[in-house]
Image (tube, helix red, strand yellow):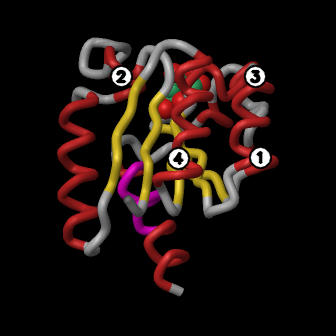
Amino acid sequence: MDIMIINGPNLNMLGQRQPEIYGHETLGDIEAKCRAEAEALGLTIGWFQSNHEGELVTAIQEARETARAIAINAAAYTHTSIALYDALSMFEGPKVELHLSHVHARESFRHHSMISGVVTGVIAGFGSSSYKLAIHALSDILKS
Ligand code: DQA
């Protein structure tokens, strides 16, 4: 596939989870939008969500064999996970870290990302459009 999209903890609760911050769309709604966006760009995507750090590590490792690029919303593990940093370091293709919310305008513990140093770029604060923007950014890189 072209882009593996990986989603971390509590994102399965979108729609019910603090809609004033994360919006009313469910993760399924966002997946459908991403699939439509990718198809329009002529790209194939994979989709994965887990609440477990190790499963996210495994998904990144597997993407080394199956995907050309990664878009990851690591959710709370963004701010804590050396394991995700290490796994992403091994992935050689382009990688986007994305967030629905504007993490730098929120609580100070969200200002630091463990993984920003090993990704190609970061997109945050555009709601579900952050996913769309990540797909477009990776599409441009993959096609260049
Ligand atoms: C998030 C931001 C994180 O700080 C938070 O822990 C999340 C979601 C976002 O998409 O805005 O779970 O990654």
Q: Is residue 79 left or right of residue 95?
A: right
User: Which residue has dot 3 on it?
Assistant: 108
Report the number of discs: 4
State which region is magenta: 131-136
Task: Please tell me whether mark 2 sits on a helix, a strand or a loop.
Answer: helix
Q: Earlier in the sequence, mark 3 or mark 2?
A: 2
Which residue occupies 26% across, 12% down?
Answer: 16
Which residue occupies 23% across, 27% down?
Answer: 26
Q: Which mark is residue 20?
A: 2
Q: Nearer the viewer, residue 86 or 108?
A: 86
> Between marks 1 and 2, how big is the CA–CA gap?
34 Å
Q: Callout 3: 10 Å neighbours few (<14), some, many (20+)?
A: few
At label 2, which amino acid type do we have? Glu
**From the viewer's perspective, is the residue at label 2 or at label 4 nearer?**
4
Which residue occupies the extreme bottom position in the image? 144
At label 3, which amino acid type do we have? Ser
Q: Earlier in the sequence, mark 3 or mark 1?
A: 1
Above or below for 124 versus 17: below
User: Which residue has dot 4 on it?
Assistant: 63
